[in-house]
Image: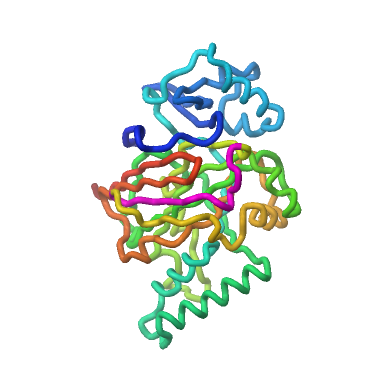
């Protein structure tokens, strides 16, 4: 798959002393790497147990983390310049759990945008009613979570193919938590201890496919609307949780062709990372390397009346997690 050039210059490096990623040299096999000060160390050679992937590193996170800090500080090791490497999605998850309707303003905007022409409510009435629903959900502690497919994951600089059937492809930049150890029925107060780190996900959605037109009573169809190949650009890095002071206070920004479309703080989340992880774990067992996407803030294409099309370039950044840059390619093109 084609990729855009690795962004340099104005794009901020990841927070902390190091980050993890998956890299490859030209015509080479992907390898797990440690990124520190703009150079990459091949962990499959630097660690004595020779991990074949970042997920393998995460599966031994607690015992390996001290060694990773030591490697980051060791300037005698053979490292490669980042500019000479292809950057892949930082990790291959087994499971992806996606939180929907988790940003207050985003849900209000979508409710107004999706109103039926026959809806007797004014825009102000619709906003007030959905705001009351959001407040009630937060008070009753009822997140909304569904399942995504790992096959939708692509790299942070790869082209995103817009399927010819996708009528309203939209962007949704999100904070994603990466699980470090199995979690089942975990209390909220212990949930963050199961997080290895954080990365960026753009959870693309075909808005026209969200609701089943042939079977309205069935409701949403997240499989079709969100899981086309490449609909989840991920990365560029996995930044250790210890390098992120507060995941509930990060800036999420998405630019489309250089124009800012999303620019919001994770403070607007109804349910923070700990509450989402705890909620998911009450039903499913979270496994090392799994992703928990935490929802997307206001500023999607439906809000702006501008959906994705061939040639668009999306640049998504989150405080301390770097920047991903992907180009949209129409399937017919």
Residue, x 33% and y 62% (percent of image)? 167
Residue, x 58% and y 52% (percent of image)? 248
30 versus 95 height, above or below? above
Viewer-closest of 20 and 44:
20
| Residue 143 horizontal/vertical position (percent) | 62, 63
Residue, x 48% and y 75% (percent of image)? 216
| Residue 18 horizontal/vertical position (percent) | 54, 29
Residue 100 appears anywhere in the view: no
**Left or right for 330, reference 287:** left
Residue 31 highlighted magenta (yes or no): no
83 versus 292 height, above or below? above
Viewer-closest of 147 and 40:
40
Residue 244 highlighted magenta (yes or no): yes
**Left or right for 286, reference 11:** right
The residue positioned farthest toward the left in the image shown: 333
| Residue 80 horizontal/vertical position (percent) | 44, 18
**Left or right for 173, reference 135:** left
| Residue 289 horizontal/vertical position (percent) | 61, 39
**Which residues lie in the magenta part?**
243-257
Viewer-closest of 89 and 198:
198
**Left or right for 200, reference 145:** left
């Amino acid at each position: 798959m084609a990729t855009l050039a690795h962004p340099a210059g104005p794009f901020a490096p990841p927070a902390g002393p190091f980050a993890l990623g998956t890299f490859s040299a030209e015509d080479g096999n992907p390898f797990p790497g440690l990124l520190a000060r703009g150079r990459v160390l091949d962990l499959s050679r630097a660690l004595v147990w020779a991990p074949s992937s970042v997920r393998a590193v995460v599966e031994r996170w607690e015992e390996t983390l001290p060694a990773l800090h030591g490697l980051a500080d060791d300037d005698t090791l053979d490292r490669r310049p980042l500019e000479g490497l292809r950057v892949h999605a930082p990790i291959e998850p087994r499971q992806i759990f996606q939180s929907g309707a988790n940003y207050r303003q985003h849900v209000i905007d979508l409710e107004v945008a999706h109103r039926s022409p026959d809806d007797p409510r004014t825009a102000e009435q619709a906003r007030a009613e959905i705001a009351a629903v959001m407040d009630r959900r937060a008070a009753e502690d009822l997140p909304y979570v569904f399942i995504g497919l790992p096959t939708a994951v692509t790299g942070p600089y790869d082209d995103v193919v817009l399927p010819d059937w996708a009528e309203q492809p939209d962007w949704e930049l999100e904070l994603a938590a990466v699980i470090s150890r199995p979690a089942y029925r975990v209390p909220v107060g212990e949930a963050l201890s199961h997080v290895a780190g954080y990365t960026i996900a753009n959870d693309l959605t075909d808005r026209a496919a969200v609701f089943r037109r042939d079977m309205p009573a069935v409701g949403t169809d997240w499989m079709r609307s969100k899981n086309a190949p490449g609909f989840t650009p991920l990365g560029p890095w996995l930044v250790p949780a210890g390098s992120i002071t507060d995941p509930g206070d990060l800036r999420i920004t998405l630019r489309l062709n250089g124009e800012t479309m999303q620019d919001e703080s994770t403070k607007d989340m109804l349910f923070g990372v700990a509450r989402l992880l705890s909620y998911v774990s009450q039903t499913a067992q979270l496994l090392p390397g799994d992703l928990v996407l935490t929802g997307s803030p206001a500023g999607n294409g439906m809000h702006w009346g501008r959906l994705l099309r061939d040639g668009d370039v999306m640049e998504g950044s989150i405080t301390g997690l770097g920047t991903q840059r992907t180009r949209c390619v129409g399937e017919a093109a």
